[in-house]
Image (cartoon, coloured by chain):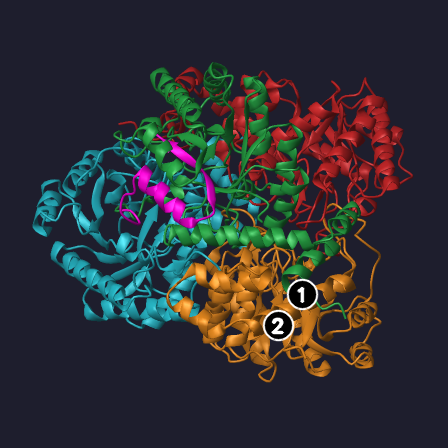
Chain colours: A orange, B red, C cyan, D green
């Protein structure tokens, strides 16, 4: 039996566009169709669902019903605060009216989260930041970011909120860029119901050691959710789990286990050119196999090696499981 | 009087999308409307125009007429070989039928280039490459890339073709990634009518020194066009000229002058959140001002400093012009 | 008259080695000789001095006398907690004895700082971190880092201490990597006499916007010192000021001015192949010239542009001063 | 029985310094002592040996005798053209006298290579490049690089020479930076006895796909040697094999096998803080284990997946061997 339940961002099963394939990598997919595709994976228990849904005619009840039909539930509701309206920022938009619009949308998403029984409501303020030197007043940006989030989270003391940080894209600099800076923002917001969604790939390309960042967030009691994927360290490539950094992924999973994590692990992938159901399945099978590998590891011996900072010993234990090193 | 004519990629004036603002950063813009916007800049003589046009109802004659009406002309025709159909590659697509489709589209673009009087027909094989380790047979990819381009360029010996290289995006690895590898591909194609579009920003984030790459391409007689923009070294941010790397831009413009370049300089920008007409104007004014600065430089003294590899002297000359260093 | 006093890390005038030129880039330079060289610059008022000095025969009084003779003073004392003994870490070394050695050396450096009248005693825990995945227990590392610093700073409540963060080198991952994570560590240490040395280049290659990081540190009352240099975003190249990022440097200096900074600006450069006196002078002249440029800027207009997030306007103001854009 | 003989750069067993631990990471190690250490690994057949040796009293005959005593032989002789004398360049030094010194040293190294029976004489022109924008005349640099190498290689038509390219370090930009640009330089040199040492890690951090670069070099008949290690994509970290990129390493080894490579694989590591004998052994055991893994792969099925550009299938085959994915 698998150690964790699995989940996914619903976008994994949606339509992908980028600035070149402006006719999209495939046809449109509605929120309900995406849920159906997610169900096809066969191993997903929870979903992180964007709001508003793809079609105004789809109601929260429709979504809930479709989840129920597949025996799934909502992990999170993530409001679309990074679309055209918010291109210069959501909580940090120069226009007070747009800032209010972002706050209102996030409040509405929190209501939907409560209504649909999601574990948390997510902030991904992807447009809050800047592109050019000299473009913004950094103190003002920080103030507006904190103030905007405070207005939302203080209005729903019963709802858990979480920020997903990322270094950049779509802005050249995102404000909520690293685990540490996000912890500082959470301190400034000053409520108890705001934490962090720790995305392995975002951590990697923010030049963090993801296992260290996870530990840091956990030590402050702010870990709300965990997402997995992979990339090539310079961009949020959102590749399948373990495709580039299997060793760091295993180190991360060991850290997840050490803190006693018992909630789902979510996938955050963008399989532009792959079958999304297959891509999700492969990531889950990889995670299952990594967990079995960790089961076989002598974690005390690993801890002992780590207490000596013995790079070769720790690495050897894992490579020995992965590759069967010759001990003769 | 300005030293160079200026031009731009017509996409600068079009509609921008990315994977987050899937409702686009602004409304749709037709090819003809984009030409009108380009004309508003007031300094653009030539345009690099994507083909097919935004609407099948727009004919080549329509485009030509609109250019004529504004006193502009086509620098290049760039076929859309990176849309949905070509998501796994254009010349290197695993499907022979799609490879043929790419070749046919490029041939049609070459005809359009000839018809419209463009200086060259451009290849930007943005989907030719790979994302994951183990995904492709690299020898096969190289073969197909060379063979596909050969079929196009050998069919139009009178037309000038040019490859625009880029390190990555939309693929995690693009095949035509650097100046040098593109020169090797051109050798393998083996015709005389294929060269390189040297994009300053692509060169920067391929970790080249753009002035050195320009010199390398020129020394092989393969420089067909020059594009300008800026970025933060890890991604093709397509920012305005000089916004991040004014010193490298000036070094590049000196290199352009040294080789006796007398064709236009083109802008390749993506002003997602800016007024494109203003963004283009500002880049052109920056280029004009940089040319005036270079006029004031003692280029012989700079060459003398460079013959000594004297980092401080060369830098001082430029900073002195930019900032007025105190020589007292 | 210049707005700021200037200073430098004394290493700028010392002997440079790297792993290739193992015979060093020049002959050995003693602490006293380096001070003499620094004096040659003619504009340096303060120095950040490594301890132990290059020769055990050199006393604190000798160093103080030499500074006095040149009319200079100590900005900081920086203990060498990154030499052979500390290769596996200083405060985070796996060996309790070596951790104690680091603490003792830092305490001794604090005494020297007090004795010599330095403004602060600096921690640069360059070996505290890791190189390989799985090498260390990240929670333990954090604990030891905080505990080691606490032992030092709590023993000298009258002395100001400051951490200089850096992303990496000599470790592949340094623990004190960004402004934000360092602020969290300072919170955990829990004393009032520990702050941050903000190095512009370290901030750049940690992928921060340096002006934003400065503002963040200042807003928490933790800014102790400011260092300047430049690099190419992937490494701590320690180039001369403004050589690569003049616009970001100007933005940073505007931020320094906005917070009312009235202490010295220090240079942190490694002129491996340049005359260090010339390299320091050129950086200072560049800084002077940038300050004059900022004097000429309409900072209210810039603030107004920033309140609109108007990338083109702010950039135009600076480029106009640097290049004289054509407004006709 | 292992598929390949193994070798190593002798520096792996020498003394490491960097700019911080200026007292070095350990005591000095002579050329002969380093050979003894290399022999301790028990699996190294060949060594890449720096010239001049660490002590002028050590003769070529001494080195040969020590190799013989351990049943090892010289893979290569690598002249030290990156020490203090050559800090502004070896073949591209602004001083004709220093350029000549570099040429003379390389000629002497070629004689030593012949005398000692090495398979090739290596150029690693680590100081040929630049640090600052505007510092050098790029055309001149290229000319001098090609001319200097030509003078050496044309004087020894019987000796095989090879260039090891690297993107940067110790220069911010190295001239021989990528596989492709090095192939162009080799064309310009114009002799038959000059090829390439393909270093997996150098290829990775030059943003190449190492398997693709290997194929490119091989297709031109210029592959002389293969070196292995690992890094974190932004720097030449010279970590143990497979510690960060096991999947890319396996892809690379498959490419090595596909071209029918039958010469040794060499290690290029800098185990600053590790026991070098253990670090070398672990890399070799990892390579052995990866070869056994490749033996178990269905390479035809992999080729079939690659012919479809099927990212998931190829990845699955390897992860299945590494992790035992659940196929149920």
Q: Quadrant of residue A238?
A: bottom right
Q: Residue at x 66, y 34 (%)?
A: B165
Q: Nearer the viewer, residue A250 or A52?
A: A250
- Location of residue C214 in the rendering, given as x and y in whole percent from the top left corner: 40, 55
Relative placement, left or right, of D116 versus B164 is left
D230 in the magenta segment: no
Q: Quadrant of residue C111?
A: bottom left
- Location of residue B9 in the rendering, given as x and y in whole percent from the top left corner: 71, 34
- Residue C109 in sight here: yes
Q: Nearer the viewer, residue C4 or D161?
A: D161
D35 in the magenta segment: yes
Chain of the residue where label 2 is placed in the rendered structure: A
- Location of residue C291 in the rendering, given as x and y in whole percent from the top left corner: 35, 41
Looking at this view, name the residue that lies furthest to the bottom: A158
Q: Quadrant of the C terminus of chain B?
A: top left
Q: Residue at x 13, y 40 (%)?
A: C70
- Location of residue D190 in the rendering, given as x and y in whole percent from the top left corner: 57, 17
Numbered range of the magenta stretch: D24-52
Relative placement, left or right, of D51 versus D156 is left
Q: Nearer the viewer, residue B185 or A317?
A: A317
- Residue B3 in sight here: no
Say the numbered circle drawn on residue D324: 1
Say the numbered circle drawn on residue A292: 2
Q: Are marks 2 and 1 on the same chain?
A: no
Chain of the residue where label 1 is placed in the rendered structure: D
Residue A283 vertical position relative to residue A42 in the rendered view, above or below: above
Separation of disc 2 and disc 1 at Cα? 9 Å
The reply to whether callout 2 and callout 1 are in contact (CB within 8 Å) is yes
């Amino acid at each position: 039996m698998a150690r964790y339940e699995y989940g996914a961002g619903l976008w994994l099963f949606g339509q992908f566009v980028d600035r070149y394939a402006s006719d999209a990598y495939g046809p449109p997919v509605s929120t309900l169709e995406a849920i159906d595709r997610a169900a096809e994976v066969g191993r997903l228990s929870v979903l992180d669902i964007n709001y508003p849904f793809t079609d105004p005619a789809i109601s929260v009840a429709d979504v809930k019903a479709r989840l129920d039909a597949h025996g799934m539930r909502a992990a999170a509701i993530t409001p679309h605060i990074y679309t055209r309206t918010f291109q210069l920022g959501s909580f940090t938009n120069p226009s007070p009216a747009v800032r209010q619009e972002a706050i209102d949308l996030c409040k509405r998403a929190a209501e939907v989260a409560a209504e649909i029984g999601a574990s948390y409501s997510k902030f991904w303020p992807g447009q809050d930041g800047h592109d050019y030197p000299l473009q913004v007043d950094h103190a003002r940006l920080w103030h507006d970011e904190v103030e905007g989030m405070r207005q939302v989270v203080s209005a729903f003391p019963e709802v858990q909120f979480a920020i997903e940080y990322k270094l950049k894209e779509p802005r050249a600099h995102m404000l909520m860029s690293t685990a540490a800076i996000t912890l500082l923002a959470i301190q400034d917001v000053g409520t108890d119901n705001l934490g962090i969604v720790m995305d392995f790939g975002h951590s990697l390309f923010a030049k963090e050691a993801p296992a260290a960042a996870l530990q840091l967030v956990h030590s402050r009691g702010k870990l709300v959710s965990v997402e997995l994927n992979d990339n090539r360290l310079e961009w949020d490539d959102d590749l399948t789990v373990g495709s580039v950094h299997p060793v760091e992924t295993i180190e991360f999973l060991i850290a997840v286990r050490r803190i006693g994590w018992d909630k789902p692990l979510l996938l955050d992938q963008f399989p532009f050119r792959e079958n999304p159901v297959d891509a999700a399945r492969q990531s889950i099978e990889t995670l299952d196999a990594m967990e079995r590998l960790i089961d076989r590891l002598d974690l005390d011996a690993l801890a002992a090696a780590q207490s000596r900072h013995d790079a070769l010993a720790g690495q050897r234990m894992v490579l020995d499981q992965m590759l069967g090193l010759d001990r003769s």
